[in-house]
Structures are given as structure tokens and as C-alpha cells.
Image (tube, rainbow, N blue to C red):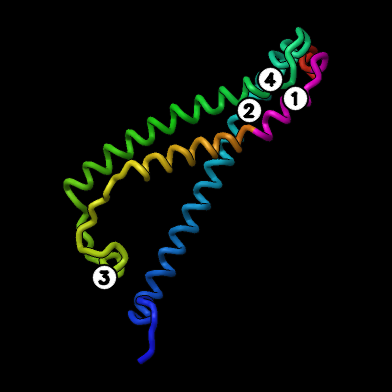
Amino acid sequence: LKGMDWQEAAGMAAQGLAALQLVFGAGMVVIGAGALVVLMNGIVIAVLERRGEIGTMRALGATKQFVRRLFAAETLSVVAVASLAGLALGTAVSLIVARRGIALSNSALVSLFGGSVLRPRLGAPSVLAHFAGALAAGSLAWVYPVRLALRIQPLDAMSGK
């Protein structure tokens, strides 16, 4: 007798499903990267629109650390509020779908999700992980825009250059 893992024992069908799960995971990474770029772009636009404000603050004595903390606080506040709203909406939709269920007729989907009716389960660890991930993305997204803000010279910003 030869020992083997369950995927090898199940054959090609299990390997195909594992590959499909890997593709879904890669797709989620791409979506996450896209969200990070959109968030960063929004912050860059906010920085560029406030060049004059940043220049005035710096001319009046605001340190680079102050400007850095200002944008960090703003970014994390916006990300936290948007994440909580998204989690609330996602929780509501998940609870509705869990109650009603989604009938699956495709055999690959039945195998992938382990049944003919899809009923999502919501758990606190998942919710907390998504919220932490959003805050981590926000923490990464403000780094480049803040560097851009700190390069603005007070005189240039105030004169509109």
C-alpha cells in the first residue's frame, strides 16, 4: 500500500478544483492591488488639490512630521469608515444569502463549494481580518502621496507653481 494525500487520491477532479481555487485567490490579489492603486490615486489627488494649504502650513511652521501625521490620520479615518460601511453591507448581504441560499447546478461549482446550495458563513475572525487588511492597505496607500506632499516647497505652493 502507498500513502497519498487526499488530492492525489481524488484524482484529476480534485487537482482541477485546487487549481480553480488558486485562480480565485490570484484574482482576489489582483482586485486588492487595484483597490490599493485607486486609494493611492485618491490621496494623490487630495494632496495636489491642497498644495496651497500644505505650503501655507509649512510656511507658518508646520513640520514635515505634522503634515505626515495629518495625511495618515485622514487616510486611516476614511479607510476605517469606508471599511465599516462595506463590512456592514457585506454582512447584511451574506446573512440574506445564507438564509435563502444560492442553488448551484454546475457540477464544478457543487464540487468547489461542497454542496448544491451555497450558504455563506460569517465569522468574527473573517470580519476582523478584512478590517485589518483594509487598514493595512490604507497604511500603505498614504506613503507615496505623503512623500509628494513633503516635497512641496512652501513658497512654490503658495505662489501656485
**Disc 2 and disc 1: Cα gap in Å?**
14 Å
Q: Residues within 10 Å of mark 3 (few under 14, many from 20)?
A: few
User: Which label is found at residue 117?
Assistant: none
Which region of the structure is painted magenta?
A: 143-156
Of callouts 1 and 4, which one flags the residue occurring earlier in the amino acid sequence?
Answer: 4
User: Of discs 3 and 4, which sits in the foreground?
Assistant: 4
Q: Residues within 10 Å of mark 1 (few under 14, many from 20)?
A: some
Q: Is residue 102 above or below residue 138?
A: below
- Please name the amino acid that badge 4 sits on: Val
Residue 26 lies, in percent from the top left, at 50, 58
The residue labelled by disc 1 is 150
Of callouts 3 and 2, which one flags the residue occurring earlier in the amino acid sequence?
Answer: 2
Q: Residue at x 20, y 58 (%)?
A: 117
Of callouts 2 and 1, which one flags the residue occurring earlier in the amino acid sequence?
Answer: 2
Residue 21 lies, in percent from the top left, at 41, 63
Mark 3–mark 4 CB contact (< 8 Å): no
The residue labelled by disc 3 is 107
**Disc 2 and disc 4: Cα gap in Å?**
16 Å
Q: Is residue 94 left or right of residue 129?
A: left
User: Which label is found at residue 45?
Assistant: 2
The answer to which of 105 and 151 lies nearer the viewer is: 151
Mark 2–mark 1 CB contact (< 8 Å): no
Q: Residue at x 72, y 30 (%)?
A: 147
Q: Is residue 124 above or below residue 25?
A: above
Residue 41 lies, in percent from the top left, at 61, 35
**Disc 3 and disc 4: Cα gap in Å?**
55 Å
- Name the element at disc 2: helix
Indicate whether residue 65 is drawn in magenta: no
**Disc 3 and disc 2: Cα gap in Å?**
47 Å
The residue labelled by disc 4 is 67
Mark 1–mark 4 CB contact (< 8 Å): yes
